[in-house]
């Protein structure tokens, strides 16, 4: 049984309300329910965490040390700003996959740089909620080295 922590960062609690033309009409709760229903609870123990507060995300990542087998993280705008979240991921030895609902490379230039990419084993963007799904599948089945 593997344990995977799914982290959503800043403003992702407003999915369904914020810019639905970009992020879709589903709420984070609906997306998390979809993710949970896609995996057998015999195969993976999923934990969902969301915060708008950078330090709380750092705490959640530190809390995964020796407790989780993988992390899926959509840090929202902190992706493009947070050395602190990148350092937390770097420090715990748990493989992480970076996810973005939208295709950040089709968007503004300032979304093209990620502090998290160098410390994540893989990135998925532009796949909407399916990005989380494939990220989890990769952490469960893929070669993460
Ligand atoms: C996002 C992309 C970020 O640039 C943006 O700040 C977000 C959401 C995405 O899921 O597409 O808040 O991470």
Image (spheres, grey):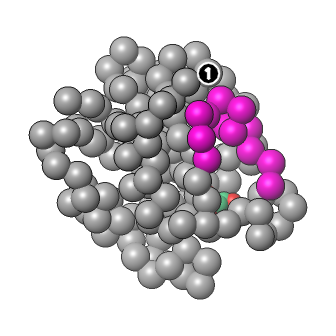
Could you tell whether 18 is left or right of 79 in the image? Answer: left
Residue at (42% x, 18% y) in the render: 65
What residue did someone put label 1 on? 90
Q: Where 70 falls versus 28 (above or below)?
A: above
Q: Is residue 118 magenta-colored? A: yes
Q: Which residues are magenta?
A: 112-123
Residue that sits furthest to the left in the current view: 42
Residue 73 pos. (x, y %): 51, 44
Residue 52 pos. (x, y %): 53, 50
Quarter holding ligand 1: bottom right
Q: Where 15 falls versus 77 (above or below)?
A: below
Residue at (52% x, 34% y) in the render: 96
Q: Where 48 falls versus 103 (above or below)?
A: above
Q: Where 33 falls versus 10 (above or below)?
A: below
The quadrant in which the N terminus is found is top left
Q: Is residue 110 magenta-colored? A: no
Residue at (69% x, 39% y) in the render: 117
């Amino acid at each position: 049984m593997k344990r995977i922590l799914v982290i959503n960062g800043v403003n992702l609690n407003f999915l369904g309300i914020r810019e639905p033309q970009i992020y879709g009409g589903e709420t984070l709760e609906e997306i998390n329910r979809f993710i949970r229903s896609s995996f057998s609870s015999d195969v993976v123990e999923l934990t969902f965490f969301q915060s708008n507060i950078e330090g709380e995300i750092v705490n959640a990542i530190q809390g995964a040390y020796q407790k989780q087998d993988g992390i899926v993280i959509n840090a929202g705008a902190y992706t493009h700003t947070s050395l602190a979240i990148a350092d937390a991921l770097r420090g715990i030895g748990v493989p992480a996959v970076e996810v973005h609902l939208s295709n950040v490379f089709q968007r503004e230039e300032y979304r093209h740089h990620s502090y998290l990419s160098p410390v994540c084993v893989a990135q998925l963007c532009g796949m909407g909620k399916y990005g989380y799904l494939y990220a989890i599948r990769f952490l469960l089945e893929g070669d993460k080295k």
